[in-house]
Image: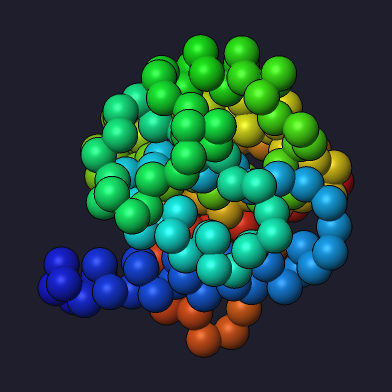
């Protein structure tokens, strides 16, 4: 498979899984976290599938397209090892969805990220909430959710907090 085909599969799967989880969440209360704003494509899509939810985006710097940046109240800039631990006063409710899009494509870097991000995600996600991630996480008390049929192969996983 070419890198182009792999990228298409990854993006198609990401979109399908986020939309699938949106259906599973339904009307459950909670915010949405976008961990890794990047260029803002996924944040922009989250705004479409969750038009009434507060979406908080986290990244160490803003590099997104101008139309895909949250307002100052919902954009949390800095090292997520700190910002996720300290942002409680800004967040009105635990997230019913945490989207983790921080894979570096380097196995060692991804393992290092998993070590520090897993407990932060585990502690934040609402009971009954979901995590969609581009890399495996260690989330005790969470169950992996089966991917819907027809979703292209990708590294993405869905977890649900029990």
* Residue farthest to the bottom, as pictured: 150
- Residue 101's spot in the image, x, y percent? 42, 46
> Which residue is rendered at x = 61% and y = 13% of the image?
86
Figure quadrant of the N terminus: bottom left
Q: Which residue is at 39% across, 31% downward?
A: 59
The correct choice, above or below, for 64 with respect to 3 in the image is above
Q: Residue 73: x, y in percent?
A: 55, 32
In the image, is 111 to the left or to the right of 50?
A: left
Q: Is residue 24 left or right of residue 43?
A: right
* Camera-nearest residue between 147 and 102: 102
Q: Is residue 124 left or right of residue 66?
A: right
Q: Which residue is at the front of the view, 119 or 81?
A: 81
- Name above or below for residue 81 compared with residue 76: above
Residue at horizontal 28 percent and vertical 49 percent from the top: 66
Where is residue 109? Give x, y as percent.
30, 29
- Residue found at x 26% / y 51%: 65
Q: Which residue is more in the foreground, 74 or 93?
A: 74
64 relative position to 56: left or right: left
Quarter of the view holding residue 118: top right
From the top left corner, tell me how far across and down residue 77 is, in percent: 41, 25
């Amino acid at each position: 498979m070419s890198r182009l085909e792999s990228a298409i599969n990854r993006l198609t799967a990401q979109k399908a899984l986020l939309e699938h989880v949106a259906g599973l969440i339904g009307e459950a209360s909670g915010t949405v976290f976008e961990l890794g704003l990047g260029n803002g494509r996924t944040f922009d899509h989250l705004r479409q599938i969750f038009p009434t939810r507060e979406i908080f985006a986290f990244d160490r710097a803003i590099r997104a397209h101008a139309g895909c940046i949250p307002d100052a109240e919902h954009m949390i800039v800095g090292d997520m090892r700190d910002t996720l631990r300290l942002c409680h006063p800004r967040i009105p409710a635990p997230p019913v969805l945490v989207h983790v899009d921080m894979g570096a494509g380097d196995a060692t870097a991804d393992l290092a990220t998993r070590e520090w991000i897993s407990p932060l995600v585990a502690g934040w996600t609402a009971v009954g909430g979901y995590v969609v991630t581009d890399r495996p996480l260690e989330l005790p008390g969470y169950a992996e959710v089966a991917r819907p049929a027809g979703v292209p192969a990708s590294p993405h996983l869905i977890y649900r907090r029990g």
